[in-house]
Image (tube, helix red, strand yellow):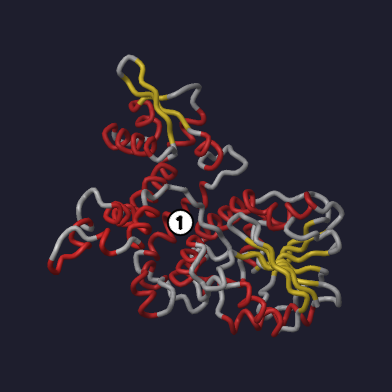
Amino acid sequence: MLPRLACWHLDVELPASRSLASRLRAPRSKRSRGSGRRGWIGDDMGSSGDDGYRLLNEYTNGFMVSQVLFAACELGVFDLLAEAPGPLDVAAVAAGVEASSHGTELLLDTCVSLKLLKVETRAGKAFYQNTELSSAYLTRVSPTSQCNLLKYMGRTSYGCWGHLADAVREGKNQYLQTFGVPAEDLFTAIYRSEGERLQFMQALQEVWSVNGRSVLTAFDLSGFPLMCDLGGGPGALAKECLSLYPGCKVTVFDVPEVVRTAKQHFSFPEEEEIHLQEGDFFKDPLPEADLYILARILHDWADGKCSHLLERVYHTCKPGGGILVIESLLDEDRRGPLLTQLYSLNMLVQTEGQERTPTHYHMLLSSAGFRDFQFKKTGAIYDAILVRK
């Protein structure tokens, strides 16, 4: 799903779509070179050199690009190259990742074309090494690594997306069809094993290692010394809050199994600045706080559950306190940005929710009683909304 989680995004340029759009706007007399019922479409569209046909093939084969990325991460290609004293040839990489030489060579050369690897030839033999992109995001040693996120997407999200047409027909997520797991209790399906829960939490930590600072500095939060990160998982945003706003204290509030996993697998400051508390934010008493952080939470749920949660927060929130909502915001006409539209489809196949426009969030928050609605586009994947009681 990526319920609180960003899809890592590889920018692969799609060729000539602007040229195609320009041609479609051209006068008919300039477009048509033939006669009869074929008209202008028959002259260009369908030929292998046509911009539209090339664009169609980019879209059609997009899943292959994703799988190259997922497979290279799964095999440990980028980690192997990061640990090597210098560039490695095909035989060394194949031996290091325990794969066939033929398959490894095909994978490596495709990664080169995707700018995930670079290659040099010495004495007729190819030697491979990481690019800046892969060094920053695809190696475990990097502080901005996205490896667990990619593995989660390759193993879980990708499977659900194979049932997108069914999700559109039925209007519901596809855990039962994909994994045989009923999804009446959404996060029981999402956390369907201890290993899956841990990887999901590791992926969340990676997402906020890249995106946390931009959303937590969209507004000055220094006036909120006591914060509560609802559904805060591994505490990645809580740690970022401490870094940005010294002196604040943060409670991470999440279901018991998540809190136990966080304590077991993630490190926290020895001081009292971060407190992990078990609970279900839909039914258990909420911790007192000046500011409640809802980071990639509301997009998991339908409007009714969002309203229920926001009303619970409002009743607990101190006067003058507020909520920081962190989501990827749709344009008001809901026709962009493309990445957010894709995230919204991801919510369809993996959760009960959707991505929303600023106006939609304004409606939900004001109906719960909150005022002083402000939102800021960060220029990154995630945006921020701040309201007060």
Above or below 48: residue 337: below
The number of discs equals 1
Q: Mark 1 sits on what residue?
A: 153
Q: Position of residue 329 (x, y in %)?
A: 59, 66
Q: Residue at x 69, y 72 (%)?
A: 279
Residue toward you, 19 or 74: 19
Residue 214: x %, y % from top left: 68, 53
In this orientation, which residue lies closer to the viewer: 130 or 18? 18
Q: Pick the residue in front: 246 or 264.
A: 246
Q: Position of residue 41 (x, y in %)?
A: 22, 62
* Residue located at (26% from left, 59% from top): 31
For badge 1, the amino acid type reads Met
Q: Quadrant of residue 35?
A: bottom left
Determine whether 188 is above or below 12 in the image: below
Q: Is residue 135 left or right of residue 122?
A: right
Observer-nearest of 112 and 199: 112
Residue 384 coordinates in the image, percent (x, y): 68, 64
